Structure formats: structure tokens, C-alpha cells
Image (tube, grey):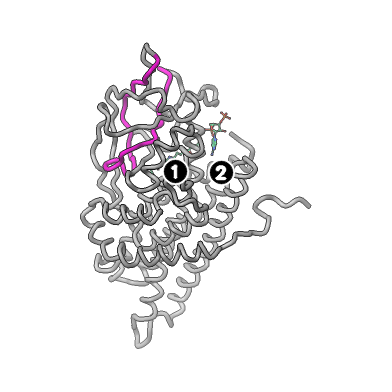
């Protein structure tokens, strides 16, 4: 019998370095982020000071080589960090995830040596903030269907970019952006069900003329993570700032999302853990009918189901981390594992935050307790970096060998 990749026993080594990292990140997150989380959620202000501190700790480029300003650690370190930061505040973990995975990772994988030095270093070190821009007002899940355009000038020196992109995490504060746009006038993304490969990735410096920040999105959750539209109005992008091949942008976007989805799975798990621990504590403390509510079987059922789903999520997340590690060696993709982890962890976060709120009763609905924030923050994990429906589509297509 031949074992499938998923059927192989898991093996993931938690080193002393990982243990020290978790301890340092947990200490920082509980001491510096937890006390400000509710205030920043309420105001929607960007938490620049604590984001800078995450940079000083090496967290803004965890997997980036030290030569490019990163911490030079592995995917497990990244995931463990995401869980601890998300437990303290989901908004901080969103900023962290976009900087690490959606911005830095793609440049590391597809950039030239000069691009890596110039474009990763300031962002991985936390001096500047990075973003990733794929979505447009009329296309989210159908990511390849874009209205924005980049046209090469007659001299062949610059692309002139025009168009509007939406839902760009960190855009209101980003210094640099990895942008995906069409490089062929009127060319369809697909023809007869086949991709035409007309999307190109560009490295965008937001200080140059022609880059305009649009309206900030007023969001239900992750409110301290700034999100806005961006507009390109005859933005001149030097040809040296094309990332990868002209026309190769869609595959770059998808490759980067595979890495990003592992980060969002870790974020969802962190939110779920925070809600679970709050629910557990409340079940121990709160008394009703003359006994702690944790002594009642209906509360116990919730605790058991929450805990079981959290641990099942962790196993799938670690499986995705292992798959990514193997993929680095084999060159194969880990798309299915990343999508399964993102799907299951985000749905666990929805379940656990809902049950934790229910355990709290009326107090769970109050802004005086953090559980209502966990409930709101968890909701986005089933939407961004690919909805649960898209993850199911990706998993099923890969299993069926369909495209
Ligand atoms: N890695 C590498 N290549 C990939 C890939 C992957 N994971 N997935 C697809 N590709 C390649 C395919 O092999 C194919 O290449 P060939 O033509 O050479 O064979 C090409 O890309 C096209 O693939 P599909 O035909 O499958 O493309 P599609 O148009 O049907 O779309 C999709 C597939 C899965 C639906 C994709 O569009 C998708 O993931 N959509 C969701 C987008 C998304 O997650 N958006 C969120 C953006 S970021 C965000 O949320 C905001 C933020 O800031 C946090």
C-alpha cells in the first residue's frame, strides 16, 4: 500500500529556539498588546507603536533570511508567532501576516537578488510596512478578472498603471505594495476555460506620484488593521520593478496565497484559543442554580467540542506546515494542505467564538468583555485570502484532478 502525503505520520520538531520564541512573543503580546486591543478596536486607529515593536523583535519578517532584514526562522516559528499575536489581538496578527506572507514571501520566491535586497529588507525589518493588492471592486473570488491595466510606454522603460484596487490590508499606511494587474489591453484572463497569463506582478513604491489612497473600509472586525482602496492614476512603474515574468503574475498571486492561507489558519486558531480560554474561565467562575456553570452537562458539551475542534485544527495546521517544508525540498505545491488548514481553522474560530460568547450569556454580548471582539474578528477568517467556498473548490478540484 502506498501512503498518500496526508496519510504519512506527522513529524514536526519543536526546538528550544521555538520554545524561546513562543515565550518571548507571548510575554510581549500579553504585556503590550492585550491592554490596548479594545481601545484600538473601538477607535479603528492603526497601532503603529506596537507594530514597530514587533519589527524590533524580528516578527515582521520571521521567515526572511537575515541578509534581507528578517529573523531567518522557519514556517513553524511563523505559525507559532501568529497564534500568540492573534490570541492577544487579531488586528495585529493581520498586519503581521500580510507583511510576512503576502508581501515578503512572494519577493523572496520570485524576486531578483537586487529586488530582494531593495524591497524585502526595509519591510522584513519592520521599518516600513508592506501590502498585497489583488482584489478589485468587481472581482474578489474570481481574482484573475481584472479591470486595472499596466501599459508599457513607447520607450520600453516604464509601465503606466491605471485602475482601482480594493480591500487592500495595510494600504492606508503601506510604504510598499506587491500589485497584480493586467499587462495586456482587452485581453481576457481566460479563454475557453484556460488562463491566458496576462496578469503581471509589480513592486510599487507608494510615495511616487500617481498612487492615491482611497476610502478606508469601516469594518465589523479586525478594526485596528487598516484597509482601504488604492487608485493608480498614470502611475509610472520602472520595468525593473516587474516581479517575476511579465504575464506570470497570476501564478505568483496563487503561490503567495498558499503561504498566506497557512498564516490565516494560524490566526484563526489563535482567536479560537483566546475565546476558548475565556469561555473555560467563565465556566469555572460563573455560578447559576447554586453551582459553577461548568458543572452543567450542556456547558461541558460546549467545552468538549471547542477543545476537540481546536486540537483538530492544530493538527491540520501543522500538517500544512510540514507540507510547505516538504514542498521547499521537492518543488511540489502544498495548495490542498494550506486550503484545508485555512478552511478548518477559520470554521473552528467561528464555532468556538460563538460558543464562548454563548457560555458568557449576556456578558458575552457586552463590550466590557473581549469575547464579543473575538466573535467579530473571527468572521473575516472565513472570507479573506479566499472564502471558505473557494477553499472547498480548491480542495475538491485538486482531489478530482480538475482545473
Ligand atoms: N500555485 C501556483 N499556481 C497556481 C495555483 C497555486 N496555488 N493555483 C492555480 N495556479 C495556476 C494553475 O496551475 C493555472 O496555471 P496553467 O494555466 O499554467 O495551468 C493558473 O494558475 C490558473 O489556475 P485556475 O484555472 O485554477 O484559475 P481560476 O481563475 O479558475 O482561479 C481560484 C482559481 C482558486 C478560484 C483563484 O482565483 C482564487 O484563489 N481565488 C480567491 C482569491 C483570493 O484568495 N483573494 C483574496 C486576496 S488577498 C486578501 O484577502 C486581502 C488581504 O490583503 C489580506
* Residue drawn 34% across the image and 21% down it: 160
Q: Residue furthest left?
A: 43
Q: Nearer the viewer, residue 342 or 290?
A: 342
Q: Is mark 1 within 8 Å of ligand 1?
A: no
Q: Nearer the viewer, residue 402 or 9?
A: 9
* Residue 398 placement (x, y as % from top left): 60, 41
**Residue 145 falls in image quadrant:** top left
* Residue drawn 28% across the image and 22% down it: 234
* Residue drawn 26% across the image and 41% down it: 172
* Residue 130 placement (x, y as % from top left): 36, 42
* Residue 372 placement (x, y as % from top left): 31, 63
**Vertically, is 10 above or below 306?**
above
Q: Nearer the viewer, residue 336 or 303?
A: 336
* Residue 201 placement (x, y as % from top left): 43, 30
Label 1 crowd (10 A; few <14 / some 14-19 / many >=20): many
**Vertically, is 392 above or below 374?**
above
Q: CA distance from mark 2 to mark 1?
A: 26 Å
**Vertically, is 161 above or below 45?**
above
Determine whether, in the image, residue 189 is placed left or right of residue 171: right
* Residue drawn 56% across the image and 57% down it: 318
Q: Is mark 2 within 8 Å of ligand 1?
A: yes
Q: Which of the numbered marks, if any, corresponds to residue 335?
A: 2
Magenta region, mostly helix, strand or loop? strand
| Residue under pointer 1 | 68
User: Element under label 2?
Assistant: helix
Which span is picked out in magenta? 156-185
Q: Is residue 17 magenta?
A: no
Amino acid at each position: 500500500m502506498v501512503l498518500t502525503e496526508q496519510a504519512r505520520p506527522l513529524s514536526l520538531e519543536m526546538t528550544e529556539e521555538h520554545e524561546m520564541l513562543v515565550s518571548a512573543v507571548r510575554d510581549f503580546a500579553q504585556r503590550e498588546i492585550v491592554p490596548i486591543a479594545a481601545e484600538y478596536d473601538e477607535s479603528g486607529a492603526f497601532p503603529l507603536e506596537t507594530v514597530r515593536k514587533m519589527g524590533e523583535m524580528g516578527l515582521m519578517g520571521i521567515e526572511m533570511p537575515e541578509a534581507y532584514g528578517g529573523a531567518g526562522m522557519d514556517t513553524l516559528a511563523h505559525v507559532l508567532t501568529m497564534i500568540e499575536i492573534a490570541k492577544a489581538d487579531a488586528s495585529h496578527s493581520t498586519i503581521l501576516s500580510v507583511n510576512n506572507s503576502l508581501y515578503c514571501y512572494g519577493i523572496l520566491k520570485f524576486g531578483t537578488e537586487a529586488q530582494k535586497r531593495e524591497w524585502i529588507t526595509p519591510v522584513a525589518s519592520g521599518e516600513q510596512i508592506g501590502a498585497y493588492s489583488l482584489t478589485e471592486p468587481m472581482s474578489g473570488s474570481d481574482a484573475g478578472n481584472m479591470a486595472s491595466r499596466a501599459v508599457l510606454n513607447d520607450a520600453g522603460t516604464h509601465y503606466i498603471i491605471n485602475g482601482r484596487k480594493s480591500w487592500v490590508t495595510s494600504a492606508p499606511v503601506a510604504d510598499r505594495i506587491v500589485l497584480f494587474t493586467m499587462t495586456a489591453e482587452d485581453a481576457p484572463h481566460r479563454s475557453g476555460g484556460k488562463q491566458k497569463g496576462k496578469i503581471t506582478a509589480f513592486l510599487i513604491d507608494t510615495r511616487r506620484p500617481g498612487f492615491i489612497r482611497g476610502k478606508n473600509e469601516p469594518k465589523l472586525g479586525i478594526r485596528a488593521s487598516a484597509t482601504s482602496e488604492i487608485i493608480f492614476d498614470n502611475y509610472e512603474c520602472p520595468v525593473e520593478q516587474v516581479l517575476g515574468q511579465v504575464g506570470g503574475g497570476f501564478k505568483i498571486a496563487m503561490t503567495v496565497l498558499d503561504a498566506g492561507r497557512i498564516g490565516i489558519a494560524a490566526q484563526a486558531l489563535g482567536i479560537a484559543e483566546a475565546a476558548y480560554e475565556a469561555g473555560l474561565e467563565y465556566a469555572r467562575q460563573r455560578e447559576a442554580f447554586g453551582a459553577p456553570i461548568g458543572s452543567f452537562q450542556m456547558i461541558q458539551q460546549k467545552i468538549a467540542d471547542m477543545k476537540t475542534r481546536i486540537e483538530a485544527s492544530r493538527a491540520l495546521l501543522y500538517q500544512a506546515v510540514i507540507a510547505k517544508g516538504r514542498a521547499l525540498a521537492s518543488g511540489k505545491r502544498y495548495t490542498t494542505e494550506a486550503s484545508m488548514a485555512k478552511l478548518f481553522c477559520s470554521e473552528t474560530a467561528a464555532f468556538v467564538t460563538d460558543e464562548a460568547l454563548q457560555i458568557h450569556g449576556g456578558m458575552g454580548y457586552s463590550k466590557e468583555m473581549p469575547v464579543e471582539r473575538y466573535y467579530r474578528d473571527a468572521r473575516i477568517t472565513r472570507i479573506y485570502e479566499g472564502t471558505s467556498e473557494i477553499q472547498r473548490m480548491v480542495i475538491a478540484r485538486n482531489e478530482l484532478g480538475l482545473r
